[in-house]
Image (cartoon, rainbow, N blue to C red):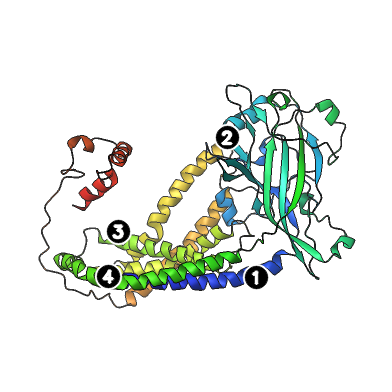
Amino acid sequence: MAFPSISRRKSCTFFTYLILIFQACNGFIYLEVICIRIHQEIVNSLTSIETELPFSYYSLPYCKPQGGIKKSAENLGELLMGDQIDNSPYRFRMNVNESLYLCTTPELSENDVKQRTRDLYQVNMILDNLPAMRCTNQNGVKIQWTGYPVGYTPQNSNDDYIINHLKFKVLIHEYEGAGVDIIGTGEEGMGVISESDKKKASGFEIIGFEVVPCSVKYDPEKMTKLHRFDTVPSVSCPQEIGNSQIIREHERVTFTYDVEFVKSDTDGHLGIVFVIFLRTVRRDLTRYEELDKEAQAQMNVELSGWKLVVGDVFREPSHSKLLCVMVGDGVQITGMAVVTMVFAALGFMSPASRGMLLTGMILLYLLLGIAAGYVGVRMWTTIKGTSTEWRSVSWSIACFFPGIVFVLLTFLNFILWGSKSTGAIPLSLYFILLALWFCISVALTLLGGHLGTRAEPIQFPVRTNQIPRGIPARSFLVLEHFPSELSSLSFSSSFLASGLGGSTMSSASCLSFSCCW
């Protein structure tokens, strides 16, 4: 009906308004925590827009930290996302602009870097949980994307060039006042701020991390005489092709980088967004009140269509068990999504912890198995009039769709294992997921199903006719009202043709129309 629809919109709008208030308050609380943290520069897996296989950063001959590679402790969400967080060899000193030498690699094997370059792999770096962003301006529009390429291949050229010089720009916001520490960054996450510097009455928060990649050809014999973090002349990017480092077998590559700190007046907390949302919510509430009169006029029209199906809409379907399973799993997924958004908006799932959102979603999904079992079994009792076979319904809710997902996950994981990708799930995680599934989700679903048998069946608002309404049989996917040529087209061709014609329904609408009939 129209009236309940508008009232639900008002409720959702008011609920959003409350979340924004709590989120604004949470932003000020988070400010006190972030000002005393020490940041570190880390590297994530190599990813590509051409393939879904991530690889380790150190699978390529990049410079390694002096203390060795140290993997960060990963939570459940990071493992499932395929992240592999490692420490990096880069050194950042707060508010110190410098150009430094990093290392010179041993002789390259041509396929090591060239294949990753041609597969368009990107290097992902993280500073204070902010990804390195690459920016460009095209036709007056600023375009940003994360990471930078391993290398590049110029047009009309068969040669590949490696990215071996990075120009980092760190955007910082200064806070003045007593009692705040200067935030520092250093290699392997170690602080580089002296005790005398800490006495200064100012602090900094990192609010942006940008990178400009370029390829520079160095003399390996000359550069190997330098030590790590020795100062080198700064270079401008981009370089001409003749001055770029080509990827060639038995070639040694030198890596350098620049660091520039830029003060910004932009606060990292988006308090102004709250004001914008507040005005938007008020405007939406006003518009919904104006729609009440139009809804009253529409209600009479909707009732005429409802009278045609009122006696058959609550009739038992042919696959009632599958319907109960789908409704139960739908309640579980919807509840997980709603609770996750509420917790994230209230600040319980901090963005400073990578993978926390996915971990929280999985745990909420497991715990909401009790709601899925309750709703599914109660619906089964309502349809059948008895609670027999409720165990079968509960087991189907707990295992049918999650089992399909688990089989697909296993199949894809074998492919990732064969490719030696960092996206492959460890074997130990399989046993953890199975234990969580059967010990928590299945158990709670059975408990919810047992509670559903004790609940009263749902009372339908109308009676169901004893004689079902006759529906003429229809052939599957027959498009009678359109030319026969259109039915032979593929989905993409029909969609393209309908989009260009402007007066023809899209193929998706045609399929939905025929399926409904």
* Nearer the camera: disc 4 or disc 2: 4
Look at mark 1 in the image and give the residue it sits on: 28
Q: Is residue 458 above or below residue 260?
A: below
Q: Is residue 367 visible?
A: yes
Q: Position of residue 486 (x, y in %)?
A: 22, 37
Q: Is residue 484 above or below residue 143?
A: above
Residue ID at (48%, 46%): 410
Q: Are marks 4 and 2 in contact (CB under 8 Å)?
A: no
Instruction: Give whichever of discs 3 and 4 has the lower sequence position.
Output: 4
Residue ID at (33%, 77%): 454
* Nearer the camera: disc 1 or disc 2: 1
* Nearer the camera: disc 1 or disc 3: 1
Look at mark 2 in the image and give the residue it sits on: 120
Q: CA distance from mark 1 to mark 2?
A: 40 Å
Which residue is more in the foreground, 7 or 373? 7
| Residue at the far right in the pictured view | 196
Look at mark 4 in the image and give the residue it sits on: 295
Q: Amino acid at mark 4?
A: Ala
Instruction: Give whichever of discs 1 and 2 has the lower sequence position.
Output: 1
Q: Position of residue 351 (x, y in %)?
A: 61, 60
Q: Position of residue 208 (x, y in %)?
A: 67, 53
Instruction: Give whichever of discs 1 and 3 has the lower sequence position.
Output: 1
